[in-house]
Image: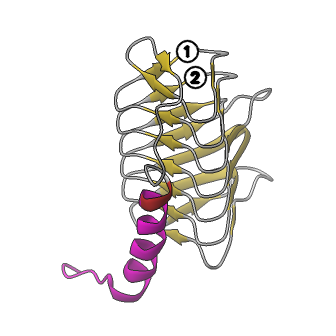
Amino acid sequence: MAVYALADAVPSIDPTAYVHPDAVVIGNVRIGAQSSVWPGAVLRGDDGLIVIGARSSVQDGSVLHCTEELPTVVGDDAVIGHMVHLEGCTVEDGALVGNGAVVLHRAVICTGALVGSNAVVPAGMEVPTGAMALGVPAKLRLDAVKPGMISEPARIYVRRAEQYRRELRRLDG
């Protein structure tokens, strides 16, 4: 894995977290217990703080950034899909951000909320618990998240990270 300090900002990665060798973690980044960061993901805490809670996944190709004033925070048991961009926002516990989505400054994805694939959540928007944010710009669909829609993918990625930690081996070098 490519983990870099930037001046005095040194990443903190829980020993039970899985960071794929092709992911990049830079600067003021904290990754919690049993969380996973997958190939091509970039977590760049150069201006401020990025926090990934416990048992959360940041999947392939996602980019997480922050500003001096606005940290990017992902809670526990959250799912950040493939090719997601998070910038200066909060994704609370047990929320899901679908593949290709963008979540911008000061947006809050509340506990148990879901951002649909390719949606753009504009600056300052709040996606309430149980709601889906769909489209560009995102529009809310209240009370649309069904039981298991988020918790099951979160559990799958905790198990997948355990498997990768045990079984992944490079064959070309």
Q: Circles 1 and 2: CB distance less than 8 Å? A: yes
Query: Residue 37 appears at what percent x and percent y?
Result: 48, 60
Residue visible at 67% across and 15% down in the picture:
124
Name, please, the residue furthest toward the left: 172
Circle count: 2
Eyeballing the image, is 39 above or below 119? below
Q: Amino acid at mark 2?
A: Leu
Q: Amino acid at mark 1?
A: Pro
Numbered label attached to residue 104: 2
Left or right of 118 in this view: 122: right
Quick one: SS at disc 1? loop
What's the magenta bit mostly, secondary-structure-wise? helix
**Which badge, 1 or 2, comes first in the chain's sequence?**
2
List the residue tagged with mark 1.
Answer: 122
Q: Quadrant of the C terminus?
A: bottom left
Quick one: SS at disc 2? loop
Eyeballing the image, is 98 above or below 128? below
Q: Nearer the viewer, residue 93 or 147?
A: 147
Residue visible at 50% across and 57% down in the picture:
151
How crowded pointer 2 is (Cα within 10 Å; few <14, some 14-19, many 20+) is rated as many
- Residue 161: within the magenta? yes
Query: Residue 43 appears at what percent x and percent y?
Result: 56, 47
- Which region is colored magenta? 153-173
Query: Residue 2 appears at what percent x and percent y?
Result: 50, 62
Residue visible at 36% across and 40% down in the picture:
83
As measured in the structure, the alpha-carbon distance from the residue carrying label 1 to the one carrying label 2 is: 5 Å
Q: Nearer the viewer, residue 146 or 87?
A: 146
- Residue 155: within the magenta? yes
Residue visible at 20% across and 82% down in the picture:
171
Query: Residue 161 appears at what percent x and percent y?
Result: 44, 73
Left or right of 163 in this view: 51: right
How crowded pointer 1 is (Cα within 10 Å; few <14, some 14-19, many 20+) is rated as some
